[in-house]
Image (cartoon, helix red, strand yellow):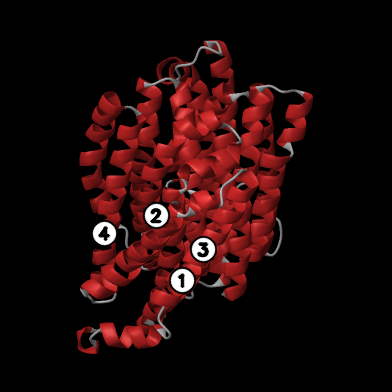
Amino acid sequence: MFKNVIANLFGKFWGLLSNFVFIPIYIKLLGFDSYSIISFGLMISGILAVLDSGLTATLSREMSRSDNSSQDKQRIFKSLESIYFIITAIVIMFVLFNSSYIATVFVNTKKYTVNDLIEFICFIGIDVGFQLLIKFYLGGLIGMEQQVVSNLYQISWGIVRAGLVVVALLIVPSLKMFFIWQAGSSALFGFVLCLKLRKVICGNIYRGFSMIEKQVIQNSWKFTRGMLFISFIAALNTQMDKLAISKFLPVEELGYYTLATSLSMGLMFLVSPFSTAILPRLTNYFTANLKFEAHILFSKVQNLVSILVMSFCAVLFFNSYEIIWIWTGEIYLANHSHVFLKILSIGVAFLALAVIPFNVAIANGYTKLNNVIGLLSLLITIPGYWIFTKLYGSIGSALVYSVVQVLITLTYLYQINRKFFYTRSFQYIFLRPIFFPLLVSFTLAYGFSLISDLFLFGRLSMILWISIVSILIICMTSLILLPKSEVRLFIKTIQFNKYKW
């Protein structure tokens, strides 16, 4: 599994690095108004991800199950792939047919005409459709524990999509060229990954479509249905803030907000490599009824992830202005976006802490809890985003987002530990994974911020200082909190007579 973690770390690091490197270039070549339209496209992508219907998670889970034979996996893959082709077509046609409505109702900009916006949205729809297809095939490779190969394809796609588009923009510096390139690169890699996964699972590259087997759908429908509902709730909870901003405020405000979101989501990149590597192993453990081993693995990964996430969250919180200025080189962007980064980094940090427990639920095919919590959270988010965005602008949206994520994560951690590991220990569930790392890392980051003026004279000195501080906070927090033996911690905090397996 270590090899998979390293591969995933490298892949996610590339994703974070590409955002860090290329977004300022897009702003410089196209202008911030155009970047705001790109932000709107990202929002559309996030909302339409719900049409994934949980099939990617289903494919990954079924491919990693120890009780599925090679023939079973081939049948499952062929049926799910055929369904996914239909979903891709639905996504593209939905956006094309509704492009006029989307452009006139949800985009408030003076730089582009409605016809320009309609054209951009059509290309966004094509791009989003093939993005979903790419994620489906990558999920299949991950389920087959081909994670090194999966990351190589993902990095290659990122280089073509995010990097080489700069060359195209240097030749034709227009937003239309940007969206054409995005759609074309996604279509290309969708086709390449289709051929690759067919070969991995089936041993040869079969052509055309396969019949959708009723038995396959019946066997996986409960899990897929649950994942569909989770995707729907997640799309609302993660995109409703941006939808409210685009509805009530100028699209430039969405650009500032998305800029801060892009940086704060770097915290999710810290967790993704561990999540991707641990899910197949957890699935294997639980299907083989090795619950003790699953708990040991969960404890180790969750503690490490908590320290990493809270350490970097503290750095983002106390250095938000400096980080945005270093990143973009524009003082006006730092002035407009740094407050959003402070607030959103808290919410994203707690969202990241729920990822590993979520993998425990997925490994057991358990989606009910996510659906219940998601539905309850909508009681806050739907009126909250609309009311607070109208009253307080983008800051209101950021506050609602972070408060909801904190409440969801605390509830989710408790319920997952209670259901699958039979523990209600406050120390094990909350103190060690959340509050201790938060307290230590934020205290250290605040202390370093008090002396930061002694070292910050320009962008280069800021980069060096923040890098050193980040490393020091991670190391010091780890030395203070990371136990010498996760097994010893497990034995100490869990009462064995409560286990019922």
* Residue holding disc 4: 410
* Residue holding disc 1: 476
Q: How far is disc 2 from disc 1 in space, using C-alphas? A: 19 Å
Percent position of residue 396, x then y: 30, 33
Of the numbered discs 4 and 2, the one sitting upstream in the chain is: 2
User: Residue 196: in sight, yes or no?
Assistant: yes
* Residue holding disc 3: 276
The residue under label 2 is which amino acid type?
Ala
Which numbered circle lies on residue 370? Answer: none
Q: Which residue occupies the foreground of this view, 492 or 85?
A: 492
The residue under label 4 is which amino acid type?
Leu
Q: Are marks 4 and 2 in contact (CB under 8 Å)?
A: no
Outermost residue, front side: 454
Q: How far is disc 3 from disc 2 in space, using C-alphas? A: 18 Å
Q: Nearer the viewer, mark 4 or mark 2?
A: 2
Q: Secondary structure at mark 1?
A: helix
Q: Secondary structure at mark 3?
A: helix
Write down the quadrant of residue 410 in the picture.
bottom left
Percent position of residue 147, x then y: 61, 64
The residue under label 3 is which amino acid type?
Thr
Q: Are marks 3 and 2 in contact (CB under 8 Å)?
A: no
Write down the quadrant of residue 32 in the picture.
top right
Pointer 4 local density, CA inside 10 Å: few below 14, some 14–19, many at least 20: some
Pointer 1 local density, CA inside 10 Å: few below 14, some 14–19, many at least 20: some
* Residue holding disc 2: 349
Q: Is residue 281 above or below residue 368?
A: below
Q: Nearer the viewer, mark 2 or mark 1?
A: 1
Q: Are marks 4 and 3 in contact (CB under 8 Å)?
A: no
Percent position of residue 392, x then y: 29, 28
Q: Which residue occupies the foreground of this view, 127 or 453?
A: 453
Percent position of residue 351, x then y: 37, 53
Q: Residue at x 40, y 38 (%)?
A: 340
